[in-house]
Every structure is written in C-alpha cells, then in structure tokens.
Amino acid sequence: MSSPSTSVSRSTFDEVMVPNYVPGAIVPVRGQGSRIWDQDDKEYIDFACGIAVTVLGHCHPKLVAALTEQGNKLWHLSNVVTNEPALRLASKLTEKTFAERVFFANSGGEANEAAFKLARRYGNTRAEGKNEIISFHNAFHGRTLFTVSVGGQAKYTQGFEPIPGGITHLPFNDVAALEAAISDKTCAVVMEPLQGEGGILPATAEFARAARELCNKHDALLVYDEVQTGMGRTGELYAYMGLGVTPDILTTAKGLGGGFPIGAMLTTKAIADYLPFGTHGSTYGGNPLGCAVAEAVLDTVSEPAVLEGVQVRAEKIRARLDALGERYGVFGPTRGLGLLIGAPMSEAWKGRAKEIVNAGWKHGVWCLVAGPDVLRIAPSLIIPEAELELGLERLEAAVAELCA
Ligand SMILES: *Cc1c(COP(=O)(O)O)cnc(C)c1O
C-alpha cells in the first residue's frame, strides 16, 4: 500500500480543497533553476516563476543556504521582540531605496493592506474627511476585502458586499481624469508602475509624473504597488527607479522572498510616524526565517550582473515572441518592462491566451496569462541561455500545433 503522500494526485485536489482554484493537470514535485519536474518526472521550463515570484529560479544555492542556516538557528519570535534578519533586511531595503522605514508582512495583499491603512490614518489625522483613495481600472492589489476593493476589477468584489467605501476608480494612464477627480479629500493615489494582472500595461512617464505632481498639490500619498514589478523584475531593483518618480509608500512581495512568503511596505520616516505603537500589526510579519531568505534574495538580485542580465534576456524573448506571433497570427507586438512580458492576443485569438498556456504545458513549458487576452512570460532573472532557448522552442512547438 502506498503512503498518502505518494498516492495524492491532481484528482485529490477536488476531493479535499476549497474549489476557489482550478490547478493545472500535473503536480510538480521538484525544481532546479528554471526547470521543474512533475510526478511522472516530465520536465518543464519555467517561464512563470510561480506568478513572477521565484526571481532566482528554484533552489538557488544561496537561498537554500540562507534558509537552512536560519532554519537551524531560529524560526519565529513574533513582534514582541525584534530579530537580526529583520533588522538586516530592513537596513538593506532602506539603503537601496528612497525609504527610511519598513513594515514587514507575509504577502503582497498584506503589504498593501498596511499601505492603505497607513494612507487612511495619514489623511484622517491631517484633515477631517481626508480619506478618499483613488485607484485605477484593471488594477490588482490583492484579495483581502480592502485590497480587492481598491483593486479595479469588479469580478473580485462581486458577492462580497458590502465593500469598504471611499474608493474611486479611474481609467489608467488618463491624466485628465486624475486631475478632475483628485482633491484635498484624497488621502492616496494607488497605482502599479506597470499593471501586471491587468494585462502587462506600463504607466506612461507622463502619467507617472502627473500623479506625483497632483499628489504633492493635494497632500495625498502616492502609493506604488510594486508587488509584481519589484525585486529586479523590470531590470531595476524597483520599477520606480526607471520611471524617475519616487512614491511615498512602496509595497513589495512576490520576488522579495524568491518563493518564501514575505511582503513589505516601505515609506519615509515622516509618513511612518502615522502608524504609531498599536495601530497595526502581524504575528508572522518580519519573522527571522522569511527575512533571512529575503536578505539573500536582495543581496543576489542587487548584483549588477543580475540586473544587467534582465534586459539582455528580455530583448531576446521579445524578439522571438514578436516573430512567433507574427508568423502564426496569434499575438503581438509584445509589451512590458524587463522580464515582465505580455503578448496581447490578436483579433482572431481574443480571449484565448489560456489555450496557449495549456498547449505549453503539453510541450513542456510553463507560461502564464494576464487576463484572457494576454500571454504573460515572467522567467527567472537568471534563467540560463540553454533553458531560455529550450523554453522558446517548446512554446513555438505549442503554438505551431495549435495553429496546425
Ligand atoms: C500578486 C499581487 C498582489 C497580491 O499579492 P499576494 O501575495 O497574492 O497577496 C498585489 N499587487 C500586485 C501588483 C500583485 O501582482
């Protein structure tokens, strides 16, 4: 008789799990670099990174070393006392960014929850009724009730009413709409420098600048959700650095832990003072194990060779995808920043991005969608040449078969 751990399979999911996900047909069991293997030992090239998370691939030796070293030392304390890995990670994050203060959470949604609560408290403290949040259509900020409400996709709030009020959604990259809506009642403008889940849509430089200026004019906080764009994904440590606009609050998660769940909210000292003792908290936030891993991720991603390699890989992938999309008429031209790449479906393929992902699985490459109309590629920042080539070949074979 096989033990329960070896006899589980994809069908077990439907018997024991809440049906809010519909996972793919195979169950991966191990990974190394940019390759993963399923229960039948079939190999896949990873162009997905667990949704733009595993920025250094699977089982990177430096991350495994950090995890095991800390794992043998100290896992958890709570925030009743502080710990060395959290203090080191916060020091490095403040050295490398605009920020002077850090709050640790365990996910992107939690980092955003902290950011939005801080923005509300900042506004309410400074002026009566200054608590309105402006965010954008198709934005994604997480799945807590507050973060889905600030997010700009109605499908994620439907059925969860009543939802928190005081939130206005505007079209993204529309300077005139923002100018018309912002006022002294606004406490925050929340945006992704590049909308990820919404379809790989970068903010224009003009819009980013206007949002910064309008926030200054109305004493509103500019909040950058860099949960997906952060930690080297765009070729900068954080995307704001490439835009030339500095936010007041920045949230980071996904790539930060390289696969270990951790999130953080970064801000200035003056703004951080609006969250004094007792106003917010988390049991696990800043736990030594997560912070030790994230410190190793930050150290490694910050190496110039890693950040420089992002652009080289991105150009190669985009040229190949553009050629592939044109040849078969499925998608194109690609868009995005660094290794966060979107291929919008052609007219004939509207709504069918998922079919390409499924065909990719069959051919041994794992890609993502960003909504029904965009194929998303988000490989490891250090994916080796051979894996990159093989993944592109497999994706090409998948598209060729679909179009045959
Ligand atoms: C993934 C994502 C989130 C949510 O992060 P979780 O870790 O799933 O809570 C928030 N914002 C953006 C931009 C994201 O891509």
Image: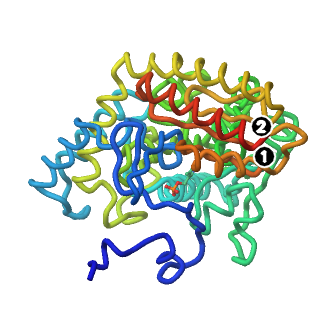
Q: Nearer the viewer, residue 288 or 396?
A: 396
Which quadrant holds the C terminus?
top right
Query: Residue 273 at x, y = what percent?
Result: 42, 49
Q: Nearer the viewer, residue 300 or 90?
A: 300
Residue 96 is left or right of residue 74, and the answer is right
Give the colouring mode of the picture.
Answer: rainbow
Task: Name which quarter of the figure residue 56 lies in.
Answer: top left
Give above or below for 249 relative to 22. above
Q: Which residue is mark 1?
A: 373
**Residue closest to the far left:** 73
- Give the amino acid type for the residue marked by disc 1 in the picture: Asp
Q: Residue at x 33, y 21 (%)?
A: 303
Of pointers 1 and 2, the one earlier in the residue sequence: 2
Q: Which numbered circle lies on residue 344?
A: 2
Name the element at disc 1.
loop
Give above or below for 273 relative to 226. below
Q: Which numbered circle lies on residue 303?
A: none
Q: Residue at x 22, y 53 (%)?
A: 288
Residue 371 is left or right of residue 47, and the answer is right
Q: Are marks 1 and 2 in contact (CB under 8 Å)?
A: yes
Query: Residue 390 at x, y = what percent?
Result: 50, 30
Which quadrant holds the N terminus?
bottom left
Local packing at callout 2 (Cα closer than 10 Å; few below 14, some 14-19, many 20+) is many
Gap in angstroms between the C-alphas marked 1 and 2: 6 Å
Give above or below for 106 relative to 237. below
Name the element at disc 2.
strand
Local packing at callout 1 (Cα closer than 10 Å; few below 14, some 14-19, many 20+) is many
Q: Residue at x 50, y 78 (%)?
A: 17
Q: Nearer the viewer, residue 253 or 199?
A: 199
Query: Residue 191 at x, y = what percent?
Result: 66, 42
Give above or below for 113 relative to 64. below
